[in-house]
Amino acid sequence: MGPVSATQDTGERRATVLLVEDELLLRWPTGEYLRDAGYRVIEAATASEAIAVLSSGTPIDLVFSDINLTDAMSGHALAGWLASNHPQVPMLLTSADRRELGRVAVDTMRAVLSKPYDLCAAAERIRQMLSQRQEPAHQEG
């Protein structure tokens, strides 16, 4: 099955996914697959890099992050920061540690995906989360 199209999610503008993954061998193929699916992908290796992107004013429609990052800040901490600073941006969290996934408060803005994940399933979950949104993301200054 091929990539899931991203063009319907935000109208004429392609949806932008901020991919936060410290493992290059996971980040690279995931980013490429999502690009092939039509998403604009911005990659970050740490939560600190992700916060810099989110603070820059670049419109982000969804954050897809590993929970266990090698940065001083975990994916859980990034989720808390996102909820406080950009509550309109949904977040998909992933981990191979099922206990970590169980700590995530899942709701309409937060979802989990266990590793290892199928790239097509990840793209489909992102599409579903974006289609639930009422309006495109906008960043507050």
Image: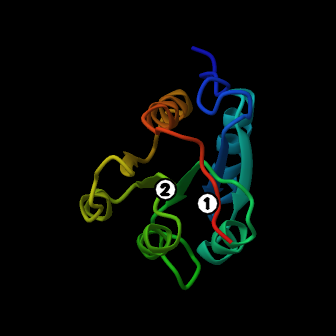
Q: Which mark is residue 8?
A: none
Instruction: Give the Cα separation between the discs numbered 2 and 1.
Output: 18 Å
Q: How many numbered marks are there?
A: 2
Q: Amino acid at mark 1?
A: Val
- Left/right of residue 98 with respect to residue 82 in the rendered view: left
Marked residue nearer the N-terminal end (2 or 1)? 1
Q: Left or right: where does residue 5 sit relative to residue 64? A: right
Q: Quadrant of the N terminus?
A: top right
Identity of the residue drawn at 46% across and 62% down: 87
Image coordinates of residue 21 in percent, x first then y, are: 61, 60
- Residue 88 marker: 2
Q: Badge 2: few (under 14), some or many (20 or more) residues near its Cα, within 10 Å?
A: many
Query: What percent of the width, then of the height, locates residue 91?
Result: 47, 54
User: Amino acid under label 2?
Assistant: Gln
Q: Secondary structure at mark 2?
A: loop
How would you rate the neighbour count of disc 1 (Cα within 10 Å): few for under 14, some for 14-19, many for 20 or more?
Answer: many
Q: Which residue is mark 1?
A: 20
Q: Quadrant of the C terminus?
A: bottom right
Quadrant assignment, res 99: bottom left
Quarter of the view holding residue 138: bottom right
Q: Give the residue displayed 59% in from the left and 73% down from the top.
A: 47
19 over 31 or under it: above or below? below
Q: Residue, x 42% and y 73% (percent of image)?
A: 80
**Residue 59 screen position, x and y as percent:** 70, 54
